[in-house]
Image (cartoon, rainbow, N blue to C red):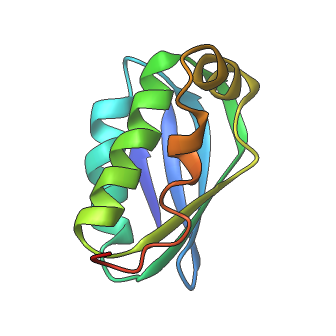
Amino acid sequence: MIGDICDCQIEDLGEGRFAVHGVLGFETVTKVLEVGKTMFGEYSIIEVDFSNVERSDSAGLALLIEWVNWAKHYVREITFKNLPKQISAIAEISEVGWMLTAGARWTGSP
């Protein structure tokens, strides 16, 4: 199944693995956020691969942080693979890179 959002798609690779394709920016992230949460909903462990993202911006970073917050709220684990260089650079400059790995292991209340 592929969730098609304008210039961006989320592909369900099965078993909680997903691939994002296309442009991940201000024009697409709102829809990608909602489609992603719907597609991720049935899985407790989620892996999202960004190797097919052509372009991204700070809205893409905000999307990933929102997915991490969603995963924590619903007690899920989420990991990101092959982050776009733009997102990694913005996260580093903004000193929020640690947030992109914060969803990798979620065990509930401390």
Which image quadrant for residue 53?
Answer: top right
Q: Is residue 13 above or below residue 32?
A: below
Q: Nearer the viewer, residue 103 or 24?
A: 103
Instruction: Report x, y in % for residue 105.
Output: 52, 72
Drawn side of residue 43 relative to residue 72, left or right: right
Residue 100 vertical placement versus 23 (above, below):
below
Residue found at the very far front of the displayed protein: 110
Residue sitting nearer the eye, 87 or 102: 102
Residue at (58%, 42%) from the top-left corner?
Answer: 98
Q: How many marks?
A: 0
Task: For residue 5, say whether it is visible.
Answer: no
Can you see residue 104? yes
- Residue 72 x/y as whole percent: 32, 64
The residue that appears at 76% across and 46% down in the rendered structure is 82
Task: Give percent across and percent down for residue 109.
Answer: 27, 76
Q: Is residue 32 left or right of residue 105?
A: left
Q: Left or right: where does residue 14 sit relative to residue 3?
A: right
Identify the residue at image location x=49%, y=28%: 60
Residue visible at 48% across and 61% down?
103
Q: Quadrant of the C terminus?
A: bottom left
